[in-house]
Amino acid sequence: MENVARRGTVYGTLLNHRDALAALGNTVNELPYKAAPEAPILYIKPRNTWIAPGEAIAVPTGVDELEMGATLGLVIGRPACRVSEADAMNFVAGYVIVNDVSVPHESYYRPSLRFKVRDTFCPIGPFVARDAIASPDALGIAVMIDGETVQRASTAGLIRSAARLIADVSDFMTLAPGDILSVGVAAGAPRARAGQRVSIAINGLGRLDNPLVAEGALA
């Protein structure tokens, strides 16, 4: 993590899993949006959220449990501006596991920052070079709480593939070396409480393990 996230920006992507969008049902067709998103919906996980494998996720006072948003992070290796889908993966240096932690909430298009950017709400790691992964669009993801598997997902369920996501995002902004663009979280993100330990495994990337600790118990 020290060689990756500390020098870039970490972007989250909303509703890029087919099952996450399907779980909303007809809600996406109601006011104020009236339709499913036609472009990537991004948000930022700022530096205060970043922690390394093994470090503690702080459960805020007054919050019973947190959502564990397991996702794949695309680590940008060189400036990407208006790149084509065919060329997009040439701008990727490698991959990381990202736990996009959130306070449970119902606002799916524009979640309040207070739900997404609390201190320690973005564990990241380990890093794997691009050439070590044959395809980022067919990776199994498993989430374990205290050693028990509570969710299985796959990047095969993405609405926008990794290359398509980079192409679409770089069409309106430049992605810089060191940036991490997470591909999105599947529906049904499991929840965990203080005193538990979450582990996220992605095929070919290993595991990201972090304990959850009550905010007041952190030194």
Image (cartoon, helix red, strand yellow):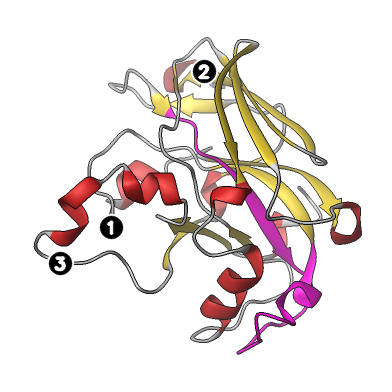
CB atoms at circles 1 and 3 under 8 Å apart?
Answer: no
In the rendered structure, does residue 85 fall within the stretch colored magenta? yes
Task: Please say if 3 is above or below 41.
Answer: above
Of callouts 1 and 3, the N-terminal one: 3
Q: Which residue lies furthest to the left in this view?
A: 31
Q: How crowded is mark 3: few (under 14 residues within 10 Å), some or many (20 or more)?
A: few
Could you say which disc has been placed on residue 109 in the image? 1
Residue 93 percent across, percent down from the top left: 82, 66
Q: Helix, strand, or loop for circle 2?
A: strand
- In the rendered image, the quadrant that contains the C terminus is top right
Residue 206 percent across, percent down from the top left: 80, 34
- Residue segment shown in magenta: 67-93
The Cα atoms of the two marked residues, 3 and 2, are separated by 40 Å
* Residue type, numbered disc 2: Val
Q: Helix, strand, or loop for circle 3?
A: loop
- Which residue matches tag 2? 213
CB atoms at circles 2 and 1 under 8 Å apart?
Answer: no
Q: Residue at x 23, y 41 (%)?
A: 106
